[in-house]
Amino acid sequence: MKKITPKDSFIAKTETDEFLVILFKTSKNKIASFIMDLFAHFYEPFIVNEKSIIITLNIGISLYPQDGTNDEELLTKAIVALGKAKKEGENTFFVFEENLEKDVRNHISLKEQLAKILKERGFLLFAQPYFLTTNKEISGAEILLRISHNGNIESIANVIEFLETSGLILKVEDYLFEEIKKFVKNVRIPLSINISSKSLASPDILSKLRELREYFDYPFICEITERLFMEKSAIEKVNKIKELDIKIAIDDFGTGYSSLSYIENLPVDIIKIDISFIKRMLNEPRVLAIVQTIIDLAKKLNIKTIAEGVENEDEFRILRLLMCDYVQGYYLSKPAPIESLINLK
Ligand code: C2E
Ligand code: CA
Ligand code: CA
């Protein structure tokens, strides 16, 4: 990208898989040729370690001064345009248009709404235990946030991406940490906390985790999605987290692009086999083979395995046969308010 962007442009990396390019003193024609150029370069596969990798891209564009006169406005509109492009499929671009104003307003109002819910302590801590496969003994619990809104309790799954792109997730996680500190002394099983890519990238995550660690009498676990382990800088961060005597779990294992052989080099204690494999393994022998391979390899590397989303006895029994260490899912326990963990065990 650096090679083909005009000299006086600005390139930044904003997310694991997202870049921001600012073209100064440009014109519509120059923008068009830049986009064509970008697509042309990405149509060719990239060769990495003799493997050919195809990368698709989406582009969202906003223009100064029509679409905004400050950075925040321009970025919001580029993000909204990017969202539109992504909906249209791979290798698409979208220029912000007047009629997207509505989306921008929705974006802003959702942000305000969520900020208000946060302020009113409407984010609730739920927890879902996981169990030893051999005897169904409770071994730990993952904290999952819920949103209390208009009398309903909802998952944050629908807004998690929004929380991340808007940066609000950092405030949500600050709140989460404060809440955890309140009851941690009454919980006697290891707790897992989901760490978003934004928090992992934030400069003060280490000091926040160090402080949280001091409240615990035993290590807790940070769950980090597999996708993030693609980043060298993230792996360095994870190594520093481990130095704080905090354990690391790879979340959603199998959904990223990692090859099995490389988990050997990752600083992880636990692999969480993604729910999509557990769902399909009974009907698809190839998926079962993958699950078995993950478990066997993890064992050899001294990494524990947790199967996510175990919903029934059949799945449970297969996982016991395969000697998966722990199971988590509706079969043994749904997520419940965190209070249910207090004084357990
Ligand atoms: P995740 O970390 O992969 O969490 C597992 C999700 O699977 C949870 O959804 C859980 O309720 C659901 N689940 C558990 N057992 C079963 C089962 O047997 N069947 C099915 N179908 N689903 C099951 P939930 O709570 O809606 O959370 C969704 C995602 O939101 C999480 O995925 C995580 O990525 C994110 N999330 C939740 N809480 C937090 C948080 O505190 N911080 C951050 N950064 N992300 C969070
Ligand atoms: Ca998780
Ligand atoms: Ca997961």
Image (spheres, rainbow, N blue to C red):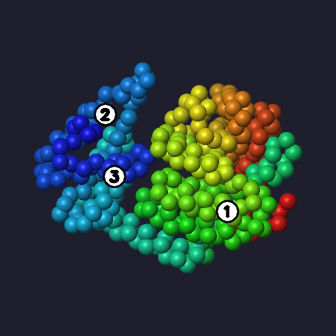
In the rendered image, residue 290, in percent from the top left (x then y), is placed at: 65, 30
In the rendered image, residue 98, in percent from the top left (x then y), is placed at: 23, 63
Going from the N terminus, do you reach mark 3 or mark 2 first? 2
- The mark found on residue 82 in the picture is 3
In three-dimensional space, the C-alpha distance between marks 3 and 2, rounded to whole angstroms, equals 17 Å
Going from the N terminus, do you reach mark 2 or mark 1 first? 2
> Total label count?
3
Specify whether residue 344 is in view. yes
Give the foreground label among 2 and 1.
Answer: 1
| Label 2 Cα neighbours within 10 Å, binned few <14 / some 14-19 / many ≥20 | some
Secondary structure at badge 3 equals helix
Give the foreground label among 3 and 1.
Answer: 1
- Residue at image position (47%, 40%) is 232
Going from the N terminus, do you reach mark 3 or mark 1 first? 3
Q: Is mark 1 within 8 Å of ligand 1?
A: no
- Residue at image position (57%, 69%) is 175
- Residue at image position (38%, 25%) is 47
> In this rendering, is residue 341 above or below 50?
below
- The mark found on residue 214 in the picture is 1
> In this rendering, is residue 97 above or below 313?
below
In three-dimensional space, the C-alpha distance between marks 2 and 1, rounded to whole angstroms, equals 47 Å
Quadrant holding the N terminus: top left
